[in-house]
């Protein structure tokens, strides 16, 4: 079990970062759209940089070892776009109003709020996010099982990405109940599908871990994170702020991740 607990804890850390979104929701009266735009751009920069500079080359190295340079490079590209296809299909199957990529960030105080409707919105959003985050939990656990040094950039990137999803969960709960405790609790619970993914990975994938599997999963995670960045985070940053604010956040996220990776060398 020694090869289980550290990867599991790292996966839980990434998943439960949705709780940060709940905390931000409680502070929303003090939060500016420009700041949120900067944060989302920053998260996109982290994910894109990690994917293309760290995960994709790492995946290619593993697959080259397993299948040779020619086939390994081909399998890396195929797995990268397979990751994009997987997350695109998940997004397509989730109705827009319950999709964690379609965020609502405030209560509409101009009309009477229906607590039952808001409760249903919370449940559907929680289910959507659980489905959306489950493969991320599998990928994070497998990466951490391979090497903590390799996993840490992935954990940071996924954790930053999960914060807006926590906001998606927290807003309807807070609007329906007005309870800070329930809001934060619900946002933390929303991230539990990632450690669940870690448990499933340990039970079913752990006996089969190999260079080939590590490579495929790393390439798929890179594809998933690039898709999320271009489909969710950058459009969201543009929507809630300004173009240049989003780009400054993007570049800041890349610089942050570059320096972080340099520290691990």
Image (spheres, rainbow, N blue to C red):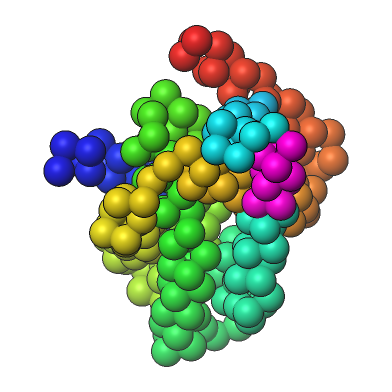
Give the percent coordinates (x, y) of residue 55.
59, 34
Query: Which residue: 31% across, 50% down?
Result: 206
Residue 60, located in which quarter of the rendered image?
top right
Where does the magenta region start and end? 70-79
On screen, 22 above or below 92? above
Residue 2, given in percent of the width and then of the height, sits at: 16, 37
Q: Quick check: is 115 in the magenta stretch?
A: no
In-image side of 244 versus 231 (left or right): right
Residue at 64% x, 34% y is 68
Residue 250 position, x and y percent, is 72, 33
Residue 31 falls in image quadrant: top right
Q: Is 24 on the left or on the right of 73, as rendered?
A: left
Residue plotted at (65% across, 29% down):
57
The quadrant of the rendering that contains the N terminus is: top left
Residue 53: % across, % down: 67, 27
- Residue 124 vs residue 4, the one in the foreground: 4
């Amino acid at each position: 079990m020694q090869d289980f607990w550290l990867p599991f804890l790292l996966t839980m850390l990434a998943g439960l970062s949705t709780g940060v979104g709940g905390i931000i929701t409680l502070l929303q009266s003090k939060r500016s759209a420009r700041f949120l735009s900067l944060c989302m751009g920053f998260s996109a920069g982290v994910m894109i940089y990690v994917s293309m500079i760290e995960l994709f080359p790492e995946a290619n190295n593993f697959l080259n070892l397993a299948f040779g340079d020619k086939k390994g490079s081909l399998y890396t590209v195929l797995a990268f776009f397979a990751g994009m296809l997987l997350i695109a299909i998940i997004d397509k199957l989730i109705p827009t109003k319950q999709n964690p990529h379609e965020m609502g960030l405030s209560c509409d105080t101009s009309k009477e709020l229906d607590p039952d409707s808001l409760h249903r919105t919370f449940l559907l959003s929680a289910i959507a996010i659980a489905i959306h985050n489950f493969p991320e939990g599998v990928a994070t656990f497998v990466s951490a099982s391979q090497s903590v040094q390799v996993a840490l950039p992935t954990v940071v990137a996924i954790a930053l990405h999960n914060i807006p999803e926590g906001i998606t969960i927290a807003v309807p709960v807070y609007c329906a109940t007005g309870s800070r405790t329930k809001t934060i609790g619900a946002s933390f619970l929303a991230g539990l599908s990632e450690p669940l993914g870690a448990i499933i990975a340990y039970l079913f994938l752990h006996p089969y871990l190999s260079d080939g599997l590590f490579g495929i999963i790393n390439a798929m995670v890179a594809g998933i994170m690039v898709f999320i960045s271009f489909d969710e985070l950058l459009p969201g940053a543009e929507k809630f702020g300004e173009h240049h604010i989003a780009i400054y956040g993007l570049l800041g996220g890349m610089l942050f991740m570059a320096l972080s990776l340099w520290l691990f060398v």
